[in-house]
Amino acid sequence: MKQFWVTFFGSVVGVVVGAVLVVFLVVMMIAGAIGAAIQGAGEGAPLPSDRVVVELDLRETRTDQPSNNPFAFGQPLPIVDVVRALERAETDRRVAGLFIRANEYGMSPGQAEELRAAIAALRASGRFVIVHAQGFESGSVSNYFAVSGADEIWLQDTATFSAAGLATETPFFGGLFERFEAEPEFLQFHEYKNAANIYTETGFTEAHLEATTSFLGSIFDSVADAVAADRGFAPDQARTLFMQAPHSAETALQARLVDRLGHVEAARTAARDRAGNGAQMVSIRAYHDSLGEQTRGDVIALIEGQGAIVTGYARGGAFGGEDMLGGDAMAEAIDAAARDDAVRAIVLRVDSPGGSAIASDQVWDAVRRAREAGKPVVVSMASLAASGGYYISVPADHIVAHATTLTGSIGVLGGKLYLHETFGLIGLNIEPLAVGGDFALAYSSQTRWTEAQREAVRAIMSDIYDDFTGRVAEGRNMPIERVREAARGRVWTGAQAAELGLVDEIGGLRTAVAAARRLANIDETAPVRLRRYPQPPSPFEAFMRLFSGASETAESVARFNALMNLPEVRAAVEARQQADQPGVRMQMHEAEPR
């Protein structure tokens, strides 16, 4: 009888849970269809006035590139599209200026640098830029860096100016694993390849601390120099003011860090007044959607990849899952652009900490073949192009990076977590069994490495490290000895990498496009069209892909949980995911500074 009631109530609960999931999916499908229709209807829509001020809200978190997420209609316009829209605004007679809501709590230095360059170009075209901040609150200088070159910076008079420097937080799981009797077994090439440290250590090693302090200092120097130039300060004045933070609104005004005090509506009114009678505010999304596609000029292919590099056709998760760079997808996009007779050059936009060594080499080969087909390839590094992200960049004709880009990390790591004793704490026993060679259980979480297995993994990693450094030497036309001095897994900023010869030029997307023009012998005054490869799916197509398989749907629903946004949960999940990926990886695990 007891079993009957257990079965009965279990069935009832299952039906209820199933019904809730069905209702949830139906609601999300309807929302997605509505969102797709709204976004599709907005393309090419006219602006509300022939005199507009474009409004850009930097308080919203933005990806570098368009997401594969079918629900991205609700996400802010990505940085690449913001930059492209502002470039179009430079010659658009309807656009009088730009009004920006400043980020309050910090952003990626690479994104800030890209936006700063776009603001400078817009001002050079005769448009004004007015910024309003409800404080620079977090201690990060990156949010101020993004807007320091504006015509006017307003600060709410009750807010503070707390921009003081940059910070990063690196989790170390060594003590956690020890408490749960888990044993990390990792090898790394070499001492600066710090990704494995988060599993094996309880704090910074000497090399890890040295490298992290070095790139943070390099970014801070780049920001301070740029802010000094933007605000007309003496070279060291910006550093001094940052060091003295926090400042009250009044002190910030006196120090000329900001230009006016007031609330956002007063600043918005000032922008409309400056634009002239009849001017209206339009969001950057609305302005972008009003532009339509360019139809004149030579074609330059834009191929984008963001997130960890993995094998196959990686797509972003539907409900908060992160985008990934799939080796198959990017290689095929490069091949398609190389075959297209209309394409004069290729710009590869990379925003990746690296990942699979195998997938990285696949993309490397596609870039090499595109060059052999006669298509110049230029890499535009965003906030991150490290480890595998650098590997896929080295065969290009020209590499462009921000001064604040994190790149390099020329090294490899591999390993696993031994979890047999951990499972024993909860009474779970997993008995591994294998036939064949000794290496069959090398990546099992239930066995420690034998000495033979350890040496085999070390040999694999040594070969891949030699391949990596050899690819860099060939692609950068550098002696292998110089490459090995700059390698050893060390992370560099774009500014440092330029001094080492690892990148060619400091700049953003527009700098990369200009380089592609030169290499393709396109006149600098001739119009060009940036054409994405592959062509992005329509919102409806992307949405239908989401529900093309039951397993994908179940996975997407499982990820839809607000708890996943907690930093400590995300860090623990990341550690477990990385530990579950056998083989050798080219990946950087430094958190981006803010």
Image (cartoon, rainbow, N blue to C red):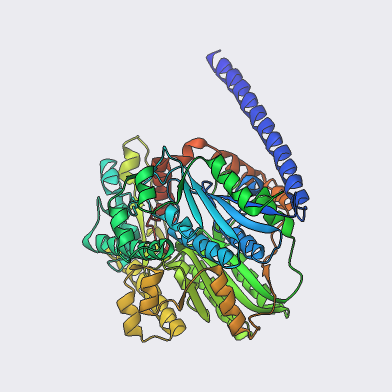
Indicate the position of residue 274 as horizontal and vertical percent values.
Answer: 61, 53
Which residue shows up at 36% across the image and 69% down it?
411
Viewer-side residue, 454 vs 395: 395
* Relative vertical location of residue 59 with respect to residue 64 in this rendering, above or below: above
Q: Quadrant of residue 485?
A: bottom left
Indicate the position of residue 197 as horizontal and vertical percent values: 30, 57
Residue at the (38%, 71%) spot, across then down: 495
Identify the residue at horizontal 38%, vertical 41% (top origin). 568
Q: Is residue 282 left or right of residue 561?
A: right
Residue 438 visible (yes or no): no
Q: Is residue 155 above or below residue 443?
A: above
At which x and y percent is residue 325? 55, 61
Give how far across and how far down residue 235 sits, in percent: 32, 66
Is there any visible trace of residue 143 in the rendered image? yes
Q: Is residue 51 left or right of residue 111?
A: right
| Closer to us: 88 or 338 | 88
381 lies left or right of 271: left
**Up-down relation of residue 575 to residue 330 (above or below):** above
Task: Using residue 57 as the reference point, say whether residue 103 is left or right of it.
Answer: left
Quarter of the image that includes the N terminus: top right
Total marks drawn?
Answer: 0
Outermost residue toward the top? 1
Most foreground residue, 101 or 293: 101
Q: Residue furthest left?
A: 206
